[in-house]
Amino acid sequence: MKKKTIWILGSIAFILICLCCMFFKIQTIEEDLRNRTRNALNEAGIKVENLIIDGRAVTLSGIVKSENIKQKAGNITENIWGVNSVSNNLIIKKSETPTPAKQQIIQNKLDQIIGLENIQFETAKEIIKPISYPILNKVVTILKENPNLAININGHTDSTGEPEFNNMLSKKRAESVKNYLVSKGISQNRLVTNGYGSSQPIVDNKTKESRKKNRRVEFKIIKEN
């Protein structure tokens, strides 16, 4: 009987030791994961107020300046070895509408993006060519950095074809651009589409090169009164 009691007590002690070892091992793993996650975020210039580690699940919380930073923090954390899941609870700090001077700077950036190369579509269709995705991604970045801005997306065509068809096509192309921006996380409430057909050329339509310039989509900031 005495031996049996000793055996039972020994077994209990062994189990308790194992549980303690498991607990401290989990604590060590979580601490390592916390340190590596915070270091990776710091290297990217992102400061997260609260970093909660539960096993291999990571929860991010706090305030960041933009949607772009929030998504970047989530992507960085997801790619850290050992992380199984990420709960991105970061809150975007509300920002004031940019001043007229700041709006003009942003408008200049949008004009420069489109000025380098027009957004390209399939001939007589509203389907965006993949070659233009990088251009639109630059617009996405600007809009995410300035979450209180709304813009007009203005579609234009050259003078080839019937005016009625051109008006419809320019509107559809503007809608396609809007849909792309929405798919990248921009609220549709910030985007207004317009189709002007061939009514607003920036050059004459006499040559192939000039017609190419007139086939365009422009982004214009909607200014508050």
Image (cartoon, helix red, strand yellow):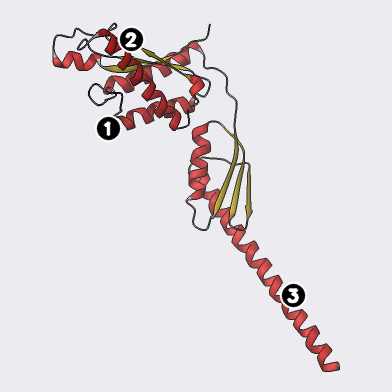
The residue drawn where x is 52% and y is 32% is 67
Looking at the rendered image, the disc whose residue lies closer to the viewer, 3 or 2, is 2
How packed mark 1 is, by other alpha carbons closer than 10 Å (few <14, some 14-19, many 20 or more), is few
The percent position of residue 77, horizontal first and vertical second, equals 52, 48
Most foreground residue, 173 or 27: 173
Most foreground residue, 148 or 199: 199
The residues bearing labels 1 and 3 have C-alpha atoms spaced at a distance of 62 Å
- Amino acid carrying mark 1 in the image: Ile
Q: Which residue is mark 2?
A: 196
Task: Please say whether residue 202 is visible from this viewpoint.
Answer: no
The residues bearing labels 3 and 2 have C-alpha atoms spaced at a distance of 77 Å
How packed mark 2 is, by other alpha carbons closer than 10 Å (few <14, some 14-19, many 20 or more), is some
Q: Quadrant of residue 182?
A: top left
> SS at mark 2?
loop
Most foreground residue, 29 or 190: 190
The percent position of residue 222, horizontal first and vertical second, equals 46, 12
Q: Which residue is mark 3?
A: 16
- Amino acid carrying mark 2 in the image: Tyr
Q: Which residue is mark 1?
A: 131
- Amino acid carrying mark 3 in the image: Leu
The residue drawn where x is 81% and y is 91% is 4
Q: Is residue 156 left or right of residue 193?
A: left
Q: Mark 1 or mark 3: name the one nearer the start of the chain.
A: 3
